[in-house]
Amino acid sequence: MAAIWRWDAMRQGSWARYFSNSLVITFFTVSLGLVTMSLAGYAFARLNFKGRDLLFFFSLIGLMIPEHYSSDRTSFRHVLVPAIFSSISEGAG
């Protein structure tokens, strides 16, 4: 770790791009997560289908596995897809 804080490193970045990337990822994660959580919540609450309890069990297991173990976060797809589908089981929290 550097002993001296260098502000010139902070000025070299494209902060508008970083902020817009964060907005895009947040928008799609929340929007698609809301759709998938609503459909999954309805299916678990109202529909009786074969394997429902097993599927619900695995969604609860998904709550117990930290999200950073699921991908390496090197691309947009690796950030967005786990966040959407992990929110199915994290919808109540």
Image: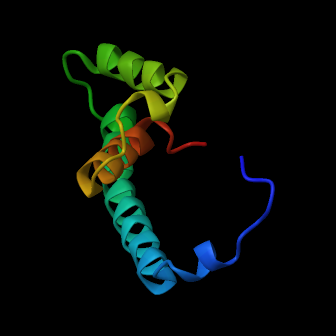
The x, y position of residue 68, in whole percent, is: 47, 34
Question: Split into 4 quadrants, where in the image is the C terminus?
Answer: top right
28 versus 3 height, above or below: below
The total of numbered circles placed on residues is 0
Q: Which quadrant of the view contains residue 42?
A: top left
71 versus 55 height, above or below: below
The residue at the point 58 percent across, 82 percent down is 11
Furthest toward the front, the residue is 3
Furthest toward the bottom, the residue is 16
The x, y position of residue 21, in whole percent, is: 39, 73
Furthest toward the left, the residue is 50
Furthest toward the right, the residue is 3
Of 90 and 8, nearer the camera is 8
The x, y position of residue 65, in whole percent, is: 49, 23
Of 8 and 80, nearer the camera is 8
The residue at the point 39 percent across, 41 percent down is 88
Please, which colouring scheme is shown? Answer: rainbow
The residue at the point 28 percent across, 57 percent down is 76
Taking 28 as reference, is 61 left or right?
Answer: right
The residue at the point 40 percent across, 16 percent down is 57
The x, y position of residue 4, in whole percent, is: 79, 62
4 versus 50 height, above or below: below
